[in-house]
Amino acid sequence: IMAIIDNFEAMLASGKDSALLRFSLGSEYLKINESAKAIEHLRRAVAFDERYSAAWKLLGKALEAREDWLGARDAYRAGVAAAEAKGDKQAAKEMRVFARRIDKRLSPAA
């Protein structure tokens, strides 16, 4: 995985910045439990393309890994909006479920 990350980082350093490259870097960093770096790249991915629902979903996962529940929920909600705008019903459905799980986690037990 580090070779992949090194390759992506070299592409970034050469000026080839894009939503896909940032998404790819975020994904690879998340695989090696480098959630802070993953979040940095995934935030850049959605800044490039706010309708990038897969990046929102991965950003939510990375934020959950850092136990940033509110941030993760916000990312999932933004991802739902992005997915719905593209007609990606499955991604929207998944992120709604993830956001609801966080809501349950955050609400006091009845």
Image (spheres, rainbow, N blue to C red):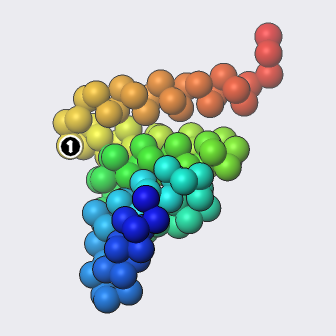
Name the residue: 35% across, 72% down. Answer: 8
Name the outermost residue toward the left: 87
Q: Does residue 108 appear to the left or right of 65 in the view shown? A: right
Depicted 40 relative to depicted 82: above or below: below
Callout 1: few (<14), some (14-19), or many (20+) C-alpha neighbours within 10 Å? few
Residue 13 percent location from the top left of the image: 38, 86
Mark 1: secondary structure: helix
- Look at the image and tell me whether residue 46 can be seen: no
Depicted 66 relative to depicted 99: above or below: below
Residue 46 percent location from the top left of the image: 38, 61
Depicted 23 relative to depicted 65: above or below: below
* Rendering quarter of residue 83: top left
The residue to which callout 1 is attached is 86
Name the residue: 72% across, 30% down. Answer: 106
Q: Amino acid at mark 1?
A: Lys
Between 29 and 70, the one nearer to me in the picture: 29
Q: Does residue 109 appear to the left or right of 83 in the view shown? A: right
Between 41 and 1, the one nearer to me in the picture: 1
Classify the position of the N terminus by image quarter. bottom left
Q: Does residue 27 appear to the left or right of 14 in the view shown? A: right
Name the residue: 66% across, 41% down. Answer: 69
Residue 99 percent location from the top left of the image: 53, 32
Classify the position of the C terminus by image quarter. top right
* Rendering quarter of residue 3: bottom left
- Look at the image and tell me whether residue 21 can be seen: yes
Q: Does residue 40 appear to the left or right of 24 in the view shown? A: right
Name the outermost residue toward the top: 110
Name the residue: 46% across, 65% down. Answer: 2
